[in-house]
Image: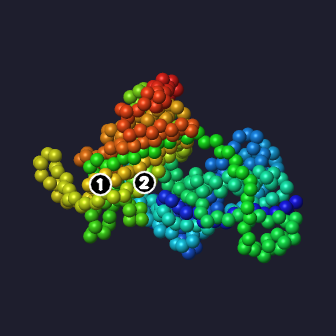
Amino acid sequence: MLKGKIILKGTIELLSPAIIGSGRDERSDVDILLDSEGRAYIPATSFAGALRHFIKLDNPYKNKLEVFWGTFKEETDSQKLRQSSIKIDDLLPVDKPSVVIRDGVKIDNKKGIAVEGGKFDYEVIEPGAKFDLNIEVTLDDNDDEFKKSMVSTIIKLLENERIPIGAKTNSGFGRIKLTDYKVYIFDFTKKEDVLRWLKQDFSVCSELKAKPLEINLKNFTINADFVIRNSLIVRSYNYNPEDPDIEHIKSKDKPVLPGTSLKGAIRARAERIVKTLGKPDNIITDLFGNVDEKEKVAKKGKLTVEETLIDGYPEEVQTRIKIDRFTGGVIEGALLETKPLFRGKDKKILNLKITINNYEKHEAGLLLLVLKDLWTGDLPIGGEKAIGRGVLEGKEATVLWDEVSVKFQNINQLKEEQKKQLQEFVSTLVNYGGVA
């Protein structure tokens, strides 16, 4: 019997670029989904799928989750399928979001160069876009208290920026935040609430007293501050003849370090470390994911790298030429202009945040070894590394796991207890004995 409704209304703000693909390649290799007016939007299916995927609860909640989300035929042995208690509208934009095309390139990690024919491009929705959120939950005297707790959980996770949407979320894309939200509860045992519902009267909001559910997250996070030692460029190609041929990639006219670039550098170094230690390849595929192009099978990784704004680093155009190694002369037509970022007088901070979701100790140990290489300038990032670009200097880092925090400014000045804690992760990697 229908007992009432819970309505959640609010605004979803995009904090990083998002890829909500349409499955088409008319404007780029991966096009953004657009509505009939040519505006980017978030389909309810994508949003609901992100919520359902993230909210993982223990087995005792299995039946309650089926009541809330409904069941798919392949998920249940029962012939009777259950309809979902939650309904989500498509998230339409408040204003027309800005959509841009980014360049990407596939790197051969063994050679450290681009794969032939590996250049591609894709559309992204720029940060700052806002979308209207409307969620409706039906109360029918069947686990209604649990449903209220689920709504509270969704609010908390969205407020705390825990649920990403779209593609490449492990590379920092699709971070969202819930703002300006209100909850409305309609109790159909009360005549006045029935009338308000029929009139769709949302003039009086309600208080949702249910406590959010505990989502068990076992994450290992590194939050580190760096400065650029000399210069940095992550290439973005210009097609206007008045502009430099290549400049540093930007988001909303501000230079950024894309999660894709940093994650690619981390993966390449992690592969080298794993091979040097003689450990199995499954460490890499578990941590970073894998795409088998022959079998058309993809596995999502556990490592997330956020996109970072680079503020306070001046840009400067440089003219470069390509030399023929045999004659020592300039190759005809090989003159180009690049516009990298350079370290200015002020040592501006570049913050990097890297997280392993549901980490294993050996994975954390591998990430710590990569951090050491980044910290000491042994792992450059971006392009033109052969001429000294992309080298970072570590300034301060905080390592978080299981409610434990280790903060340091100099690796060599760690306290004995801190060294012991971090060394335990590295030792687990060294002693890891999985089967390749």
Give the residue number, with chain letter if any, for mark 2: 308
Picture quadrant of residue 407:
top left
4 sits left or right of 178 in the view: right
Disc 1/disc 2 C-alpha distance (Å): 18 Å
72 sits left or right of 352 in the view: right
Name the amino acid, label 1: Asp
Q: Nearer the viewer, residue 91 or 9?
A: 9
Sequence-earlier tag: 1 or 2: 2
**Crowding at mark 2 (Cα within 10 Å: few <14, some 14-19, many 20+):** some
State the SS at label 1.
loop
Q: Position of residue 168 (x, y in %)?
A: 50, 52
Identity of the residue drawn at 38% across and 65% down? 253
Name the amino acid, label 2: Thr
Picture quadrant of residue 206:
bottom right
Q: Nearer the viewer, residue 295 or 357?
A: 357
Q: Position of residue 429 (x, y in %)?
A: 47, 28
Q: Nearer the viewer, residue 403 or 45?
A: 403
Give the residue number, with chain letter if any, for mark 1: 346
Q: Which mark is residue 393?
A: none
Q: How many marks?
A: 2
Q: Nearer the viewer, residue 199 or 258?
A: 199
Q: Position of residue 434 (x, y in %)?
A: 52, 26
Q: Position of residue 380 (x, y in %)?
A: 32, 44
**Crowding at mark 1 (Cα within 10 Å: few <14, some 14-19, many 20+):** few
Identity of the residue drawn at 24% across and 61% down? 317
